[in-house]
Amino acid sequence: MRAAMALDPQLRDAVQQAERLRHELRGLATAPVPGSLHRRLRAIPDGRRPGNARRLPSWAPAFAAGTAVAVVAALAALLLRQPDRLPQDEQVAALREFETSMVYLQRSATIARDEVTTAVGEGLREALRTSREAIGNGDSE
Amino acid sequence: MATRIAVITLTALAACSNAAAQGFFDFGEIPGVDEPTVEVDLTAPLLNFVAEAAREGDPLAADVISGLEGIRVRVYDTLQDPTAVAGFVDDASDALERGGWQRMVYVQDGRDKVRIYTRLEGQVVSGMTVLIVDATEAVFINIAGSINPMQLGRVASAMGFSGFLGPYNGNGEAPRGQPADSAD
């Protein structure tokens, strides 16, 4: 992970941001426990009272949350980072494939334009022919 | 608490990928054809790389490309069964329209079929699918991501002229499968 961070500034920034967040979460004040909850806890028989269980430190939930955020941020950074270290032949292949895609997109647009122009032209010619015939029929009557 | 944050974060990531996936259209198995003459599958990381390669020469093109999530191209120079391919275009058109894609161009001229569909997310085009078939040839293109059709058209028409890929092509060799009449 350290090696990956050293190589990738984006990953390093994401992990550092997650660590800062974890520290800030750790510094959050503990919320006061309502009296009703205290009473309910006291009513639990001794064998089931959480106090008898192995107690987690108060910052444990914040630490766990921070760790989860750090892991997700690191994963996201790994997934979303740019492939700036692609092998040269893959770089060339990607660029050529993009160029090929754009060439075919442009060609498709040209075909679509020509087809639409032809269809509209034929439609107009047909409409004009029909109109002329109608006018001609009207004159002859 | 930790579980909740993790769930919320993962849900947000899933929502982002789902939004990007809205513009994808899977052509699946295309009947009536052999192997494609041209087959392109560019994913977001590769497109990001292309965008960065283009940034120095054409920052606007780089911005356009960086908004794209995926490009798929299938070109078939010969058709084993043109009727089956034409039927596939009709079926795909129905599937796109059922999926909420908007019909932009729909031409049926004898055996020629030209269909262009776009998918909108609000006011933003998040996908474009092109289906073209005639008696001898078929072209299928799907582009997913945030698309500005005008800007993308500018990038497409500039290909081969702007030269931002020139240093990578080096010997001036045409891209794989480039059609002879692509300059029009």
Image (cartoon, grey):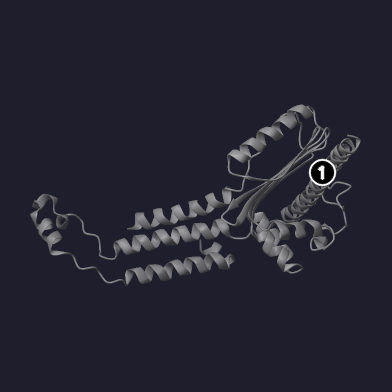
Q: Is residue B136 left or right of residue A98?
A: right
Q: Is any part of residue B167 visible from this angle?
A: yes
Q: Is residue B72 left or right of residue A31?
A: right
* Residue A50 picture location, percent across and down: 17, 55
Q: Is any part of residue A85 visible from this angle?
A: no
Closest to the observer: B121 or B158? B121
* Residue B112 picture location, percent across and down: 80, 36
Q: Residue at x 35, y 55 (%)?
A: B4
As shown in the figure, which amino acid type bears the numbered disc 1? Glu
> Which residue corresponds to mark 1?
A115
Q: Is residue B167 above or below residue B131?
A: below
* Quadrant hosting residue A38: bottom left
* Residue B153 picture location, percent across and down: 75, 57
* Quadrant hosting residue B47: bottom right
Q: Is residue A123 left or right of residue B68?
A: right
Closest to the observer: A4 or A110? A110
* Residue B111 picture location, percent across and down: 80, 32
Q: Is residue A71 left or right of residue A120?
A: left
Q: Residue at x 40, y 53 (%)?
A: B7
